[in-house]
Amino acid sequence: MAQQEEDEKYMSLALIEAEAAAEAGEIPVGCVIVCDRRVIGRGHNLTETLSDVTAHAEMQAITAAAQTMGGKYLTECTLYVTLEPCAMCAGAIGWAQVSRLVFGAPDPKRGFGRLAPQALHPKCKVSSDILADECIEKIQQFFQQKRL
């Protein structure tokens, strides 16, 4: 399977997580972590549900993946998330030593690329704009519903 196809496959799973967040009244961001073509962690925003500002999709998925792997480092893993990580999540991705980050939609206001471009591990490779239109649409639909 070509890299683009593989990235789209796993981003589709992250979009399913984002939908679960939206259904729970959370900002629809979803994340999956993959190692050796196996999903080892998944998560979606739970900040409202848990009354916890740190309960972002990436944090939930990193915790789940670390439990699956039996350790805190996620080297050789790829993290797929529907929205560009914030500085906090990028820091956690860096500390976990994730090998590759793939995100869908950019976040020009709060994304790590603007606020903390050095937060990731130096060896982490980044790919963006994977199913970006679908990721953006999910967030836009959520906020349009909130305004009704």
Image: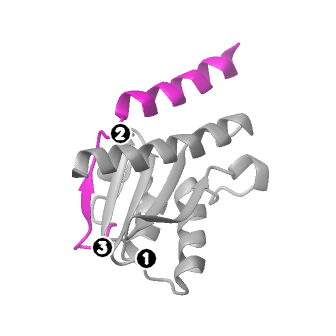
* Amino acid type, residue under disc 2 in the picture: Pro
At horizontal 65% and vertical 55% (from top left) the residue drawn is 53
* Amino acid type, residue under disc 3 in the picture: His
Q: Which label number is shown at residue 121?
A: 3
Q: Residues within 10 Å of mark 3 (few under 14, many from 20)?
A: some
Q: Quadrant of residue 132?
A: top left
Quadrant of the frame with the C terminus: top right
Q: Residues within 10 Å of mark 2 (few under 14, many from 20)?
A: some
Where is residue 81 drawn, in percent x and y? 44, 50
At horizontal 66% and vertical 35% (from top left) the residue drawn is 22
Q: Which label number is shown at residue 96?
A: 1
Under circle 1, the secondary element is: loop
Magenta residues, start to end: 119-148
Applied colour scheme: one colour
At horizontal 57% and vertical 41% (from top left) the residue drawn is 16
Query: Of marks 1 and 2, which one's residue comes earlier in the chain?
Result: 1
